[in-house]
Image (cartoon, rainbow, N blue to C red):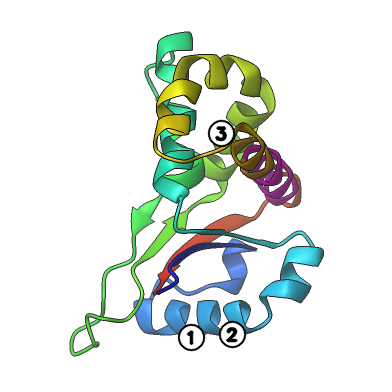
Amino acid sequence: MSIHLHFRAVAESGIRDDHTWLAAFMSEAWDNDVAEYEAGISYSINKGWHAVNDLHAAADALCTDADEPWNLPIYGGRPVPHSAGVDPSDPPLMLLEVPGVSQAARFLAAVSFDALWNVAGARLSAVGGTREEFLDHHRELQKFYGQAASAGHAVVKAVWA
């Protein structure tokens, strides 16, 4: 079984704060994931997003920022509640609004991957992750959030199983 965390950048004016509408929007985006990834407005992580969050959480040992911006790239945002009568198996959705996207982009641009890896690498390697794999995710998230922040976009997140 494959499970993905799917990120999609979008202008806030182009979305509705409605689970049914956002689920349809994200489903269409998922169908066009390759083209949207190439356009820089989409990214996804297969299965291992918890570990990518653990890598970013290593910033807790490096920083004293009380806002904990390391939570924003993966788990940041607010849940979009299901509408009444909606199938609860519809994908869980999160919405990270423009200020949060900007804060996530600043965090990812400022934090040193090597410093994060020095704190968390041994633990992440022990559960099967490779340095190159995490470096790729880190760089892709830097690029994705950097472009989203520059465009003034929000980020919608969906879990597809």
Q: Is residue 90 left or right of residue 45?
A: left
- From the image, tell me which residue sits under label 1: 24
Q: Earlier in the sequence, mark 2 or mark 3?
A: 2
Q: Earlier in the sequence, mark 1 or mark 3?
A: 1
Q: Position of residue 142 (x, y in %)?
A: 68, 39
The answer to which image quadrant residue 32 occupies is bottom right
Instruction: Tell me if I can see residue 56 in this picture.
Output: yes
Q: What is the spatial separation of the Cα atoms under label 1 and label 3, in whole angstroms? A: 27 Å
Viewer-nearest of labels 2 and 3? 2
Identity of the residue drawn at 19% across and 85% down:
84
Identity of the residue drawn at 57% across and 44% down:
101
Q: What is the spatial separation of the Cα atoms under label 2 and label 3, in whole angstroms? A: 27 Å
- From the image, tell me which residue sits under label 3: 103
Q: Closer to the camera, 12 or 69?
A: 69
- From the image, tell me which residue sits under label 2: 28
For the residue marked with disc 3, what is the amino acid? Gln
